Image (spheres, rainbow, N blue to C red):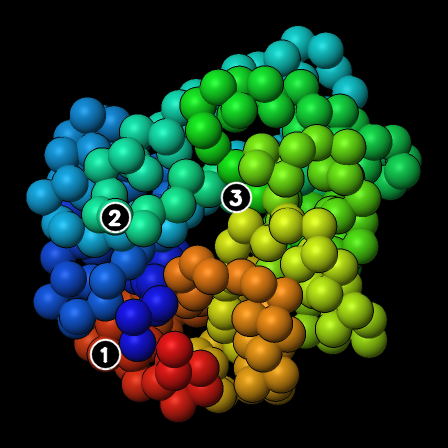
């Protein structure tokens, strides 16, 4: 399982040091981090912890949330994303060989009171373009993550791989790509074709996996499950991603209250078992 990466969201309540420790002890070689736990210890300490862990760094979550139409708020969002780019570069440099300087971007939802979905998507595209120069200078890939349409109003106006690929299409592939997250895209009848397109264009910056489980909990954000517990055809999606030329780590990113409440060391073992059963790379 040399390509398995544990995204820190799967063990959300673990601080950074604990997350790195349980990942290492589980024999998982890579980790994807979130900005909030990094901020809790400070970037310099986070860099030291990642370097000492011996783990690869697969991505930082998350930037984005730049659909606002207010000029001052937009500038604040861009400045915050530039800080996230710098954090990504520093953490990737601290990681073991094979680390990937990928910053995951979630576009954001509709501004309060707005129904202008097309306008929000256009502003998201403009924001990624505005960040491209800073990302290029830092050696960071901006990875736009399309989110399932149920989140279009409040979290992610970019809903399909097609939209995400179009959004980054005018930028260099080494600067801007897309995230293939099984939870968000598994339902798309054109998924095989779109993944193949992403591969041809050199745009697959990250591959994240978790399952779509039903019935949904009260909070739709927590409706992800361990691979094999739901409805996603991981064999097919993974084959399409590999055939498209993706060679990076495969992150397990699960928002699930039961997993969050469990012992992080136990969760890492459950992740390994589920990954081995459904993906096994």
Tag 3, which secondary structure?
Answer: strand
Q: Name the residue under label 2.
A: 97
Mark 2 or mark 1, which has the lower sequence index?
2
Residue furthest to the top in view is: 72
The foreground one among 62 and 174 is 174
Whether residue 51 appears in this view of the structure is yes
Local crowd size for mark 1, using a 10 Å CA cut-off: few (<14), some (14–19), many (≥20): some
Where is residue 170 drawn, in percent x and y? 77, 32
Choose top left, top right, bottom left or bottom right for residue 236.
bottom right
Mark 1 or mark 3, which has the lower sequence index?
3
Residue 149 circle label: none
Contact between marks 2 and 3 (CB within 8 A): the answer is no
**In this picture, residue 25 sits left or right of residue 86:** left
Where is residue 134 drawn, in percent x and y? 53, 18
Q: Is residue 100 above or below residue 85?
A: below
Q: How far apart are marks 1 and 3 (CA)?
A: 25 Å
Assign the N terminus to one quadrant of the image. bottom left
Q: Residue at x 80, y 49 (%)?
A: 163
Choose top left, top right, bottom left or bottom right for residue 149.
bottom right
Tag 1, which secondary structure?
Answer: helix
Residue 269 circle label: 1
Q: For the residues carrying marks 2 and 1, which lies nearer the camera in this image? A: 2
Local crowd size for mark 3, using a 10 Å CA cut-off: few (<14), some (14–19), many (≥20): many
Where is residue 52 drawn, in percent x and y? 9, 44
Q: For the residues carrying marks 2 and 3, which lies nearer the camera in this image? A: 2
The foreground one among 99 and 18 is 99
The foreground one among 55 and 158 is 55
Q: Residue at x 64, y 49 (%)?
A: 203
Q: Residue at x 39, y 24 (%)?
A: 86
Choose top left, top right, bottom left or bottom right for residue 128.
top right
């Amino acid at each position: 399982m040399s390509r398995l990466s544990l995204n820190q969201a799967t063990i959300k309540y673990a601080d950074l040091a604990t997350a790195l420790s349980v990942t290492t002890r589980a024999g998982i070689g890579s980790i994807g981090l979130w900005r909030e736990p990094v901020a809790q210890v400070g970037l310099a300490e986070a860099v030291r912890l990642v370097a000492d862990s011996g783990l690869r760094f697969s991505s930082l979550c998350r930037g984005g949330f730049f659909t606002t139409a207010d000029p001052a708020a937009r500038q604040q969002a861009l400045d915050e994303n530039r800080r996230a780019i710098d954090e990504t570069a520093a953490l990737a440099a601290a990681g073991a060989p094979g680390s990937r300087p990928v910053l995951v971007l979630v576009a954001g939802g509709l501004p309060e009171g707005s129904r202008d979905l097309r306008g929000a998507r256009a502003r998201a595209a403009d924001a990624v373009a505005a960040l491209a120069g800073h990302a290029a200078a830092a050696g960071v890939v901006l990875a736009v993550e399309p989110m399932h349409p149920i989140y279009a109003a409040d979290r992610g106006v970019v809903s399909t791989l097609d939209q995400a690929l179009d959004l980054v299409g005018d930028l260099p592939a080494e600067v801007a790509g897309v995230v293939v997250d099984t939870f968000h895209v598994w339902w798309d009848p054109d998924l095989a074709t779109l993944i193949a397109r992403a591969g041809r264009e050199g745009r697959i910056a990250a591959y994240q996996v978790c399952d779509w489980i039903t019935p949904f909990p009260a909070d739709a954000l927590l409706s992800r499950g361990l691979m094999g517990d739901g409805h996603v055809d991981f064999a097919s999606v993974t084959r399409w991603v590999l055939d498209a030329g993706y060679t990076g780590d495969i992150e397990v990113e699960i928002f699930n209250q039961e997993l969050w409440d469990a012992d992080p060391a136990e969760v890492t073992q459950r992740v390994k078992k589920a990954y081995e059963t459904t993906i096994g790379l």
